Image (cartoon, rainbow, N blue to C red):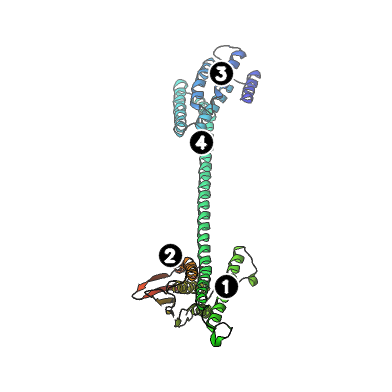
Amino acid sequence: MVGQFAFCAALYATNIYRLTPDRIDVSIGVRIAILVALCGCSYLRRRAPVTALALALVPFGVDLWLGATLPVWLILSDLVYALALYGTDRQSVGIVRLCACLSLVTCGVVFAATHNGDVVVIAVGAAAAFLGTPLWWARSVRQHKATADAERARAEALTVIAELDRRAAIEAERSRMARDLHDVVAGHISAIAIQSEAVLRLVGRPTPDDSRRPAPDIRDIVTSIRTNSTDALSEMRSMIGLLRGNDSLDDLVTAGRLDELPRLFDSARASGTEVQLLGAVGASPRTGEIPAAVDQAAYRIVQESLTNAIVHAPGQRTVVELQCVGETLTIIVANDVGRHRPERNTESHRASNFGTELGTTERRGTGLNNMRQRAELLGGHVHAGRDGSRWTVKAVIPLTSSAAP
């Protein structure tokens, strides 16, 4: 504001300020006083542009009556610019329309009064210079500001969406990790719990031929317990390595595949559950082999189904059927459901309950939900329920899926 006043005062001092001849001979002090009043109105150009322009019309009218001067018109054009830029949308459009109407009326009056085309051209040039140019510039700046605000709002919205996507990805990853940890730990630990219970039952039996060597069934059960323990540690070590982002594949143990089912069946048999395998897994006609994602998911589904059978129907016969027809892999795990469970002593009952808490689908539905999620991620589905005296789990997975298990 000080710079604007100094520039306009310099115009008065150098006597290059007249736009029209003076009607009344006044001193430079009067012109400076009018300039000071206009500069005082300019202090409101941002906070109250309408008020600033309205107040400025008084000294502007006085200056116009005395004889129009360039400094006053420059400040007036700045106030018009401020109103078009800082006012509301309605005020900005209103000042444009008002200035356009005043310019047309003024040019019409000048032509009617003078009938001189040159004077009309000068009037049009003055209107364009002092009103049209600041209005055009203000509207252009206003449009750029609106575009920038819209882009800023869009960027903030994208940031919010990205944050929501990040949280959703974290939740999905946590869910996947929880599912994998459940499938890795529950099967092995449940088998260990059931097998430990069997060992507790056999501790009191007399050894064959009164020797001190353990009974063969105890040896087999303890061997299976050790196998399940080492398998659980190996798979946990593999998952920990993956979570740490270890790129060394030599230190990681691959996830379970269907060709490892015999070892899984041996562990179930050591727990006292009879397991029978029907059918065999073929290959995809299109690719010549089962996709790794389908292979791993199928193994986990069979593992979880066997775990539930061991926990909820101990000692009952379980049949695992694998069918690979066309582009679909079908897994059926069915086990007999006993009416009554054998009595357990207190210590063995605790072991069984510990396995049940890890592998149950009846209390929390974790295992069954995990099986369904694995199948659905690959475009398949899982159905589980009781059919007469048997509990059946049926999973159908397309072999064309490429999703991660």
**Do the CB atoms of the residues marked 4 and 1 lie less than 8 Å apart?**
no
Q: Along the polypeptide, which appears first: circle 3 or circle 2?
A: 3
Q: Is residue 86 above or below residue 33?
A: below
Where's residue 255, x and y in %?
55, 72
- Binning the other alpha carbons within 10 Å of mark 4 as few (below 14), some (14 to 19) or many (20 upward) gives some
Indicate the quadrant where residue 308 lies.
bottom left
Q: Amino acid at mark 2?
A: Gly
Where's residue 393, x and y in %?
41, 73
Q: Amino acid at mark 1?
A: Ser
| Residue that numbered label 3 is attached to | 37
| Residue that numbered label 4 is attached to | 139
Local secondary structure at mark 4 = helix
Q: Is residue 324 above or below residue 156?
A: below
**Do the CB atoms of the residues marked 2 and 1 lie less than 8 Å apart?**
no
Q: Amino acid at mark 3?
A: Ala
| Residue that numbered label 2 is attached to | 365
Depth check, mark 2 against mark 1: the one in front is: 1
Judging depth in this view, the residue of 291 and 48 nearest the camera is: 291
| Residue that numbered label 1 is attached to | 229
How far apart are the two marked residues, 4 and 2, measured between alpha carbons?
Answer: 64 Å
How far apart are the two marked residues, 2 and 1, measured between alpha carbons?
Answer: 24 Å
Judging depth in this view, the residue of 229 and 72 nearest the camera is: 229
How far apart are the two marked residues, 3 and 2, measured between alpha carbons?
Answer: 82 Å
Residue in view at x 54 percent, y 22 percent: 41
Let me know if residue 405 appears in the view.
no
Judging depth in this view, the residue of 330 and 338 nearest the camera is: 338
Q: Along the polypeptide, which appears first: circle 4 or circle 1?
A: 4
- Binning the other alpha carbons within 10 Å of mark 2 as few (below 14), some (14 to 19) or many (20 upward) gives few
- Binning the other alpha carbons within 10 Å of mark 3 as few (below 14), some (14 to 19) or many (20 upward) gives some
Indicate the quadrant where residue 388 lies.
bottom left
Q: Along the polypeptide, which appears first: circle 2 or circle 1?
A: 1
